[in-house]
Image (cartoon, rainbow, N blue to C red):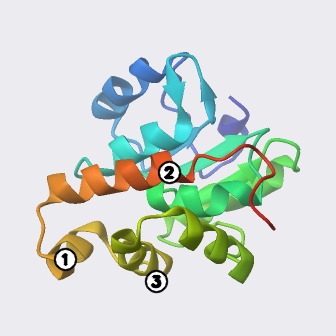
Amino acid sequence: MVLDDEPDMKHVGAAARAEEVEPLIHRTRPDVVVLDYHLPGGDGLELARRIKACAPAPQIVLYSASADTSFVVPGLVAGLDGLVNKGSQPGELFEAIRAVAYGERALPPITPALLAAAGRTLAPEDLPILGMLVDSTAPRDIAAVLRCSAEELQRRLARMLAALRVPRGALPA
């Protein structure tokens, strides 16, 4: 509800459980969705991946107390547009929402150490996908380059996201 205090933002709905999010998005058609990572019935990264597979997909900001640099690479795979820790000032969330609404990313930098750790974790055939995601290549273009269907790309992204699930703090910053 704090979003309603911002003159250029309008709160259009809230979901208490993961399974309530997608129907709410279909009803309200928001420009930006703010998700928490810890959701009853699911997690924000997998939910973001599913939302981004739909057209038209809203921009997504993960806003979580768990959000740290270990979420950057999995967040790219999931389709996150922004990442904000709940411990930051409210203005940081508002800035991230505005940035992603205008088509920009609001993610922390991807360090060589994060990429190296992801490279050791992912299957070799998935590294080109990661490279294209880092370069902001749209999923439809990734599927075209790989000559695979959108469904096959989504299966691969789900597999990549599962592989990147590591204990908090296990990826170097």
Front of the two marks 1 and 3? 1
Relative placement, left or right, of 53 versus 173 is left
Q: Earlier in the sequence, mark 1 or mark 3?
A: 3
Can residue 108 be seen in the rendering of this structure? yes
Write down the quadrant of residue 47 in the picture: top left
Q: Position of residue 24 (x, y in %)?
A: 37, 26
Label for residue 163?
A: 2
The three-letter code of the residue at mark 3 reads Asp
Q: Is residue 152 left or right of residue 97?
A: left
SS class of the residue under badge 2?
Answer: helix
How far across and down, in percent of the image, does residue 26 sit? Answer: 28, 32
Label 1 secondary element: helix
Separation of disc 2 and disc 1 at Cα?
Answer: 20 Å
Q: Quadrant of residue 129?
A: bottom left
Identity, as a three-letter code, of the amino acid under mark 1: Leu
Q: Are marks 2 and 3 in contact (CB under 8 Å)?
A: no
Q: Which residue is mark 1?
A: 146
Q: Is 166 rendered above or below residue 146?
A: above
